[in-house]
């Protein structure tokens, strides 16, 4: 999980819309 880092919407990759952490940790919500 992303405890440290800012949650940002993953839309640059064009994949499913999810939350990506600054440490490249994908979080599906």
Image: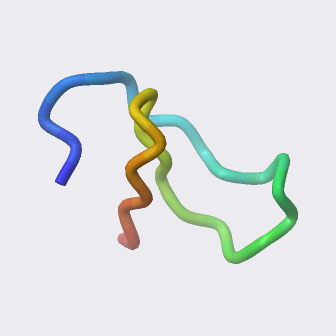
* Vertical comparison of 8 with 11: above or below: above
- Between 9 and 25, the one lying in front of the other is 25
- Identity of the residue drawn at 43% across and 59% down: 26
Farthest front residue in view: 23
In the image: residue 24, left or right of residue 2: right
Q: Quadrant for the N terminus, please.
A: bottom left
- Identity of the residue drawn at 38% across and 50% down: 25
In the image: residue 1, left or right of residue 26: left
x, y percent for residue 16: 69, 76
x, y percent for residue 8: 53, 36
Coloring scheme of the render?
rainbow
* Vertical comparison of 22 with 15: above or below: above
* Vertical comparison of 13 with 2: above or below: below
Q: Quadrant for the C terminus, please.
A: bottom left
- Identity of the residue drawn at 40% across and 32% down: 23
x, y percent for residue 17: 65, 67
x, y percent for residue 13: 82, 57
- Identity of the residue drawn at 41% across and 38% down: 21
The mark tally for this picture is 0
């Amino acid at each position: 999980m992303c405890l440290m880092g800012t949650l940002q919407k993953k839309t640059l990759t064009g994949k499913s819309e999810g939350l990506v952490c600054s440490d490249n940790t994908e979080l599906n919500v």
